[in-house]
Amino acid sequence: MTDLKKLILDRVRDIPDYPRPGVVFKDISPLLADPVAFSAVVEELAGLCGGCDKVVGIEARGFILAAPVAYRERAGFVPVRKKGKLPAETLEAAYDLEYGSAVIEVHRDAFAAGDRVFIVDDVLATGGTVQATVELVRRAGASVVGAAVLMELSFLNGRERLEGVDLRSLVVV
């Protein structure tokens, strides 16, 4: 096991039956509170960005990881939010979660044509959120150069929904 993987696994805690019975929530709060672990994760994610123009963070914990990656890479940061949270004109995409369905949005003018976009989120479960984000970026006229997650839950097969996306996971469980 690599040092980074151990650092992450030692600082992500399982919360059973949250937000619904039968779901095991991966709480990254202890990792975020540890400056060594948080810095190591940001540096690793930034190293995967590869000269992107914009870094997308997916609500809400993806914001926490993506914003410092964008800063580190001197790229713009774009939030992808739950429906109804953005003030200007938006594009939207519906998707399925491990425990339901939802709609996400991005500002219609968040990307310039041809922007190279790197997507960051905390956990890849069923892949629906990242898949919907890829769709939004492409519909806005930008290209997805890759996506990265802190942790991938391989037993939910989310990677299968992201064919053609260069997806990197810091930890796969």
Image (cartoon, grey):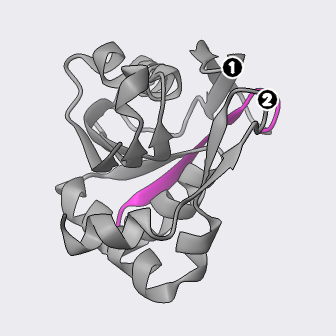
Is residue 53 shown left or right of residue 23?
A: left
Identify the residue under disc 2.
Answer: 20
Q: Which residue carries the number 1 mark? A: 99
The stretch in magenta equals 73-86
Look at 80% across and 38% down and name the residue there: 85
Q: Quadrant of the N terminus?
A: bottom left
Residue at x 42%, y 28% (from the top left corner): 137
Question: The residue under label 2 is which amino acid type?
Answer: Arg
Name above or below for residue 128 compared with residue 19. above
Looking at the image, how many numbered discs can be counted on the residues? Answer: 2
**In the drawing, does residue 147 fall left or right of residue 22?**
left
Residue neighbourhood size for the residue with mark 2, other residues' Cα within 10 Å, grouped as few (<14), some (14–19), many (≥20): few
Q: Nearer the viewer, residue 117 or 22?
A: 22
Q: Indicate the secondary structure of the residue bearing disc 1.
A: loop
* Residue 147 vertical placement versus 132 (above, below): below
The residue drawn where x is 60% and y is 21% is: 98
Name of the residue lying farthest toward the bottom: 35
Please say if 101 is above or below 90: above
Answer with mark 2 or mark 1, whichever residue precedes in sequence.
Answer: 2
Q: Is residue 29 above or below residue 54?
A: below
Give residue 46's quadrant in the image.
bottom left
Indicate yes or no whether the magenta region holds residue 82.
Answer: yes
Position in image of residue 121 (x %, y %): 47, 46
Q: Which image quadrant for residue 23?
A: top right
The amino acid beneath tag 1 is Tyr
**Element on which disc 2 rests:** loop
- Closer-to-camera residue (135/163): 163
Mark 2 and mark 1: Cα distance apart in space: 7 Å
Visible residue check, residue 73: no
Q: Which is nearer the eye, 142 or 152? A: 152
Residue drawn at the location 29% of the way across and 16% of the way down: 160
Q: Are marks 2 and 1 in contact (CB under 8 Å)?
A: yes
